[in-house]
Image (cartoon, rainbow, N blue to C red):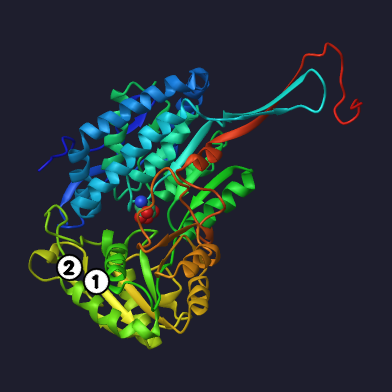
Amino acid sequence: MVKLEAEKLRNFINGEWQDVARTTAVLNPATGEEIVQVPLSSGEQVDKAVFAAKNAQKEWALVPAPQRAEVLYRVGYLMKERKERLSQLLTSENGKVIEEARGEVQEGIDMAFYMAGEGRRLFGQTTPAELKDKFAMSQRVPVGVIGIITPWNFPIAIATWKSFPAIVSGNAVVWKPATETPIMAFELAKIFEEAGLPKGVLNVVFGSGNEVGNALVNHEKVQVISFTGSNDVGREIAAACGRQLKKVSLEMGGKNAVIVMDDADIDLAVEGILWSAFGTSGQRCTACSRVIIHEKVKATLETRLLAKMEELTIGNGLDETIKVGPIINDRGIAKIEEYIQIGKKEGAKLLAGGHALTEGAKQDGNYFAPTLFTDVSSTMRIAQEEIFGPVVSLIPVKSFEEAVEVNNSVSFGLSSSIFTNDVNRVFRAQRDLDTGIVYVNAGTTGAEIHLPFGGTKGTGNGHRDSGVQALDVFTEWKAIYVDYSGKLQRAQIDID
Ligand code: UN1
């Protein structure tokens, strides 16, 4: 079992590890034990970090991108070397089962190598100019200082989605990780330090959204905010950034559905639902929280899903045999409990779970039983609002068209999935499902890092994390014209 050497974490500002007087405890959600103390910084530390970032960025932008990428390659190799350490620490602070933690760390490693490759691409365009002896091109240029705010549910992967493209494209970063999961930030900052990133290019300031988040969002020298988190906080950030004309990329909630058609392979669908609904205990933006089921196969799916749910082992994710880990904290449990009550009041039928687990070794952690509601109608709150826990609602429908309509009836648009063996339905579904991610014959989770990650409607504000598209958040486009005619040529006028 890996141990964290530090008893107290420190901010990483301008290449130095800085103490902060005020701290709070980070608890292991599986056991309730304190793992480490994390700083509760104030606006003053944010100011220092932004100042350091601003200074460092000027030099960093002048380093050729392929050389900037060398640092990311080293980061990738160090992460690979430390994969098991990082994974165990991730499970301790976040609770997700060790197999998933390894998957998340792998996502970060993949991102390092992928974005390092961008150091030799960062493609712009050349295009004919409309006048003789004139050259035209467009180029990506760094924006400056980027503020990154990351959530506790993917504390390392999402951080890499944001910081790696920002850094390879010549920006400097001030990062506020979630206070629930600061260890991944601490470890990643150490890796960057060892990889030789110049001081000030990456800064980590620990603390609350109210203090550190607010200070970062409202700092006049921070030009871009990239945020993943709740819809409510995202809206506030968007409003604040709007007032300052600050570029902002938001990745927020989901209410993702798996559609199971009457021609589907039901056993495969059950596997897909189990993995995407109860993996990470349902605490993913991409988690399946609705199953839109064709009425002809509803009874079969219910029986098989319930049987498989009974086999799920729940407990401390460091135990390799455990399939479902804890919920992040007691606030998470309280929110899920509230939705169970709402579902019952709305008339949904509870088929399994619906309660916290407090017996034996579970009494000190935050555990919730995998839960299944059926006979849910698409207008009920449990079918519309994000619960962020292991709760699935089965919504019966009569046709493919109705399934698509129900899928699209929510205010979010992150991920959707359809199980069918009808090729016509496959192509109609990928056209008509209004989410940023669509899966065919797989659950709603499992996005790969070289494709754009994000969603429509209330899930985001049009930007994408990961993929080459992430570069659009962290770069500006510059159009460059070179006239080598030796005379003044006026565009649109001297065209003969
Ligand atoms: C998230 O839940 O915010 O596709 C990220 C997936 C993961 C990423 C999830 N690769 O589920």
Q: Quadrant of the C terminus?
A: top right
How many C-alpha atoms fall within 10 Å of the one at disc 2: few (<14), some, or many (≥20)?
some
Amino acid residing under circle 1: Pro
Residue, x 23% and y 43% (percent of image)? Answer: 37
Q: Is residue 308 left or right of residue 427?
A: left
Residue 406 screen position, x and y as percent: 49, 76
Q: Is residue 388 above or below residue 205?
A: below
Query: In the depicted view, which residue is nearer to us: 400 or 15?
Result: 400
Residue, x 57% and y 49% (percent of image)? Answer: 240
Q: Is residue 242 left or right of residue 369?
A: right
Disc 1 marks which residue? Answer: 370
Q: Which numbered disc, 1 or 2, marks the residue that appears first in the sequence?
A: 2
Disc 2 marks which residue? Answer: 312
Query: In the depicted view, which residue is nearer to us: 82 or 430?
Result: 430
Amino acid residing under circle 2: Leu
Residue, x 73% and y 27% (percent of image)? Answer: 128
